[in-house]
Image: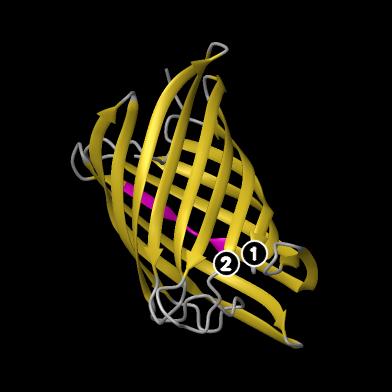
Amino acid sequence: MATPAFAGAWPQAPGALQIIVPFTSTRATEAYDSDGKSQRRNRYTKEELAPYIEYGLTGGVTLVGNVALTHERSSWIGKTIADRSVSRIEAGARFALGTWQETFFSIQPLLAWHGAESPSDPFASRRGDIDGEIDLTMGQNFKWLGMDGFTDNMIGIRIRPANRPSELKANLTIGVRPFERTMLMLKSESYVAFSRGGGPTPANLQSNKLGLSFVRELDKTVSMELNGMASISGRNTIKERSLGFALWYRF
């Protein structure tokens, strides 16, 4: 049975290549304060094109990479800030650990280089910063009302330099395939920041977002995705809404 493309906990077959090309438009006119209360703020917009690649090196090792091209616009203390750049380049590998309790586990270390020259977020990484991240991914298949389903969850830690807050993150996905070539996914993305020393950046950064995604297989090698995501809570972060479109290619 043909199934839509999916990038997640499971490895790519040796020699298999998957490329996902998403475009996302993000808007925000509110932000969360340090108490988690929503407040009005100057308008923030971001458009991002971020191709993502997975390549099956061996049966248990999948190479991963991502390049993000970003255009941001915001106002900060009465001044308009705009930035158009290669905002980040990420590269790493996912190593299969095996199955336990019907759940497939992998570990994924990666490095992220930041290229934004004047990011709108005053707490963001700066041009030339390199972050290190390690993630644990967990995938499981199930049946629900006769439909094939899956969960694909990731927990990880990202270490950031220059006394900027590091992050604990958790991305949770549950999906079902109501039709042979169609996949629906409910997604949750969360992170909480913590400081490793007495830097000037507040440590109580927190963000929780919830989203929906529709993926339709167009043919054996190409799928299309439509998605939306919105902030549901946070601290010292923007309250954002985003819409996205992506093409998935498999070779």
Q: Nearer the viewer, residue 103 or 126?
A: 103
Labelled disc at residue 235: 1
Q: Nearer the viewer, residue 168 or 91?
A: 168
Q: Residue 31's x, y, as percent?
A: 72, 67
- Residue at x 66% of width, y 47% of height: 228
Question: Is residue 106 covered in magenta?
Answer: no
Residue 103 vs 135, above or below: the answer is above
Q: Quadrant of the C terminus?
A: top left
Give the magenta part as a residue range. 48-54
Residue, disc 2: 205
The amino acid type found where label 2 is placed reads: Leu
Q: Residue furthest left?
A: 58
Q: Residue 43's x, y, as percent?
A: 76, 72
* CA neighbours of label 2 inside 10 A, class few (<14), some (14 to 19), many (20+): many
Rendered image coloring scheme? secondary structure
Q: How far apart are marks 2 and 1 (CA)?
A: 5 Å
Residue contact between numbered discs 2 and 1, judged by CB atoms under 8 Å: yes
Labelled disc at residue 223: none
Instruction: Specify which label sits upstream in the sequence, 2 or 1.
Output: 2
- Residue at x 44% of width, y 69% of height: 88
Dot 2 falls on a residue whose secondary structure is loop
Which SS type dominates the magenta stretch?
A: strand
Q: Residue 100's x, y, as percent?
A: 28, 28
Q: Nearer the viewer, residue 169 or 44?
A: 169
